[in-house]
Image (cartoon, rainbow, N blue to C red):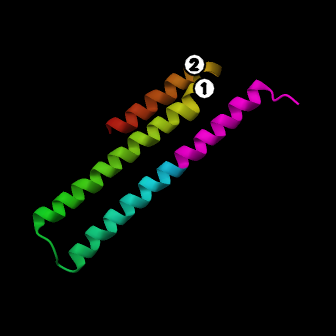
Amino acid sequence: MTIEPQFEVKAATTDLKCEYNRKTLHRIHRIQGQLAGLEKMIEADEGSCEERVIRARTIEKGLTSLITHLVECYLVNTARDTMIDDPNTAVEEISRIFDLLNH
């Protein structure tokens, strides 16, 4: 029995989406842990202001990394196919993503 090439592409795309979702959730859980650590530090009145700022900046960098990852996921899993099927729609969607990143 042969598998249609189109089915292979869809299966690969589904696997890729699952992998992106796994990585996305991992990033979210890491950020949640960092936030919880900062919250505990503040509740216990521990750490200097500098240490708190360093932790907050680490959280900020994690969020920036998460956003970059989400945009990459969109480009790989959605925009690529849309670009083939409907280039004008793809350009509009990508433009909206850039607007979100800049505001």
Q: Position of residue 47 (x, y in %)?
A: 14, 72
| Magenta stretch: dominant secondary structure | helix
Q: Dot 1 corresponds to which residue?
A: 82
Mark 1 and mark 2: Cα distance apart in space = 6 Å
- Estimate how packed mark 2 is, as few (under 14), some (14 to 19) or many (20 or more) residues with alpha carbons within 10 Å: some
Q: Which residues are magenta?
A: 1-21
Residue sitting at x 50%, y 31%: 75
Q: Secondary structure at mark 1?
A: helix
Please tell me whether residue 30 is drawn above or below residue 48 in the rendered image: above
Query: Does residue 17 belong to the magenta stretch?
Result: yes
Would residue 5 appear left or right of 90 to someone viewing this image?
right
- Estimate how packed mark 1 is, as few (under 14), some (14 to 19) or many (20 or more) residues with alpha carbons within 10 Å: some
Residue sitting at x 28%, y 71%: 39
Q: Position of residue 96 (x, y in %)?
A: 45, 32
Q: Position of residue 10 (x, y in %)?
A: 70, 33
Q: Is residue 1 or residue 88 the one in the foreground?
A: 1
Query: Does residue 79 belong to the magenta stretch?
Result: no
What's the amino acid at mark 1?
Thr
Would residue 33 appear left or right of 55 to someone viewing this image?
right
Please tell me whether residue 34 is drawn above or below residue 4 in the rendered image: below
Determine the residue located farthest toward the right in the rendered image.
1
Give the number of the disc on residue 6: none
Looking at the image, do the residues carrying marks 1 and 2 touch, with CB atoms under 8 Å apart?
A: yes
What's the amino acid at mark 2?
Pro
Residue sitting at x 53%, y 32%: 76
Image quarter (top left, top right, bottom left or bottom right) of the C terminus: top left
Q: Position of residue 24 (x, y in %)?
A: 48, 50
Q: Dot 2 corresponds to which residue?
A: 87
Determine the residue located farthest toward the front in the rendered image.
1
Please tell me whether residue 76 is drawn above or below residue 54 in the rendered image: above
